[in-house]
Image (spheres, rainbow, N blue to C red):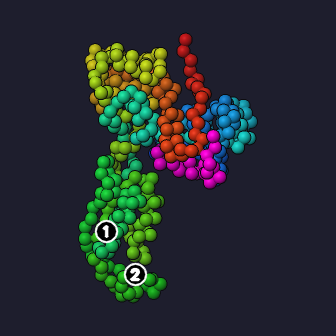
Amino acid sequence: MKFTESLLMTIKDITNYIEEIAPLYHAESFDNVGLLVGKYETKVNGVLVTLDTLENTVDEAIAKNCNLIVSFHPIIFSGLKKLNGSNYVERVVEKAIKNDIAIYAMHTALDNSFVGVNAKICDVLGLKNKQILIPKKNTISKLTTYVPSKDAGFLREKLFDAGAGNIGNYSQCSFNYNGTGTYNGNENSNPVIGEKGKTHTEKETCISVIFEKQYQSKILKSLFQNHPYEEVAYEIVNLENVNQKIGMGMIGELENDMDEDSFFEHLKKVMNVSVIRHSKKLGKPIKKVAVLGGSGSFAIKNAINSNADVYVTSDIKYHEFYQAEDKLIIADIGHYESEQFTKNLLVEHLTKKFSNFAVILSEKNTNPIYYI
């Protein structure tokens, strides 16, 4: 079950790939994601993928020779003030440390991913034309710099290669205009063009490109490496644009309309649920479906504004069902049930990247809720 190149594979190698799918930067501010237990430089024997990390999850990792647990929910959420085994969180962390098992959590970083939790729900339900329900704000910035016109094309391409210039379905996007730049280097300068102590005039191109904030360090590194000037003039500003590929929840469409009862039967079957709590049926066909794994009451209005016929989520309270306002049906399928396929999704991603690696789907059902 071990990866033949395990001597070379570290936790950081695994998490670098995970963070391509779900960058930690995209997690919500209240969340606790990333490597919660362990060290990035640890060599990996195998990976156990789970929804929650409990004591029996750590036992399973030990039994299956996995020293990295990739969990959706973080076992440490609000912080630990002591570690003496007085509750299940402390016991899990204690057991993981004693057995040299690392724990990595993704949670809202994966919730906000276009290929994450909600995309998986859409796939299971058979929805097409997927779009983000609540696009995330404050994720896009703009870089503006000035470069000799003869070098503008080269620098622009290097910025694109580093991740700049992507807008929705378009790439290599930029805005450019020509002007005149001047500078005068002092005695400690080493100008690439012109002479120190003399004012130089140069035909320059102003280049502006937008980028996702997660790529900022990579883009700036490329800027400094590929810009010809000794001193690079640049500015970065945050934009109000929302990112249509990052955010909570999703909207999609069924291949064909379904009546309400048929949709509920379909929902129960594919999501493997026996009980659905829902608001009043409206006697209308179901075509457009909004989904949000986990607690989704905060997005009811977003689902209504998206013109969804039904909103599939969980943890809806009594009074929150009234918010349907006869404009859609709210369907609460349960928290665990809404996120249950997340670990399958992670295994699918990891096995594609690390085909010979021991990536194991946890066999433990961690749902704390039972139904009679």
Question: Can residue 313 be seen?
Answer: yes
Which region of the structure is painted magenta? Answer: 1-23
Picture quadrant of residue 322: top left
Q: Secondary structure at mark 2?
A: loop
Picture quadrant of residue 132: top left
Q: Position of residue 56 (x, y in %)?
A: 67, 30
In front here: 258 or 248? 258
Q: Is 57 a magenta residue?
A: no
The residue identified by callout 2 is: 192
Q: Is 8 a magenta residue?
A: yes
Q: Position of residue 334 (x, y in %)?
A: 48, 23
- Mark 1 is on which residue type? Gly
Location of residue 193 with respect to 53 vertically, above or below: below
Which one is in front in this view, the residue at disc 1 or the one at disc 2?
Answer: 1
Location of residue 319 with respect to 146 vertically, above or below: above
The residue identified by callout 1 is: 153
Location of residue 228 with respect to 75 vertically, above or below: below
Question: Can residue 142 be seen?
Answer: no
Indicate which disc, 1 or 2, sits on the residue closer to the N terminus. Answer: 1
Q: Position of residue 151 (x, y in %)?
A: 33, 73
- Mark 2 is on which residue type? Val
In front here: 40 or 327? 40
Crowd rating for badge 1 (residues with CA inside 10 Å; few <14, some 14–19, many 20+): few
The quarter of the image holding the C terminus is: top right
The quarter of the image holding the N terminus is: top right
In front here: 252 or 10? 10
Q: Secondary structure at mark 1?
A: helix
In this rendering, the count of numbered labels is 2
Picture quadrant of residue 120: top left
The residue that appears at 57% across and 51% down in the rendered structure is 13
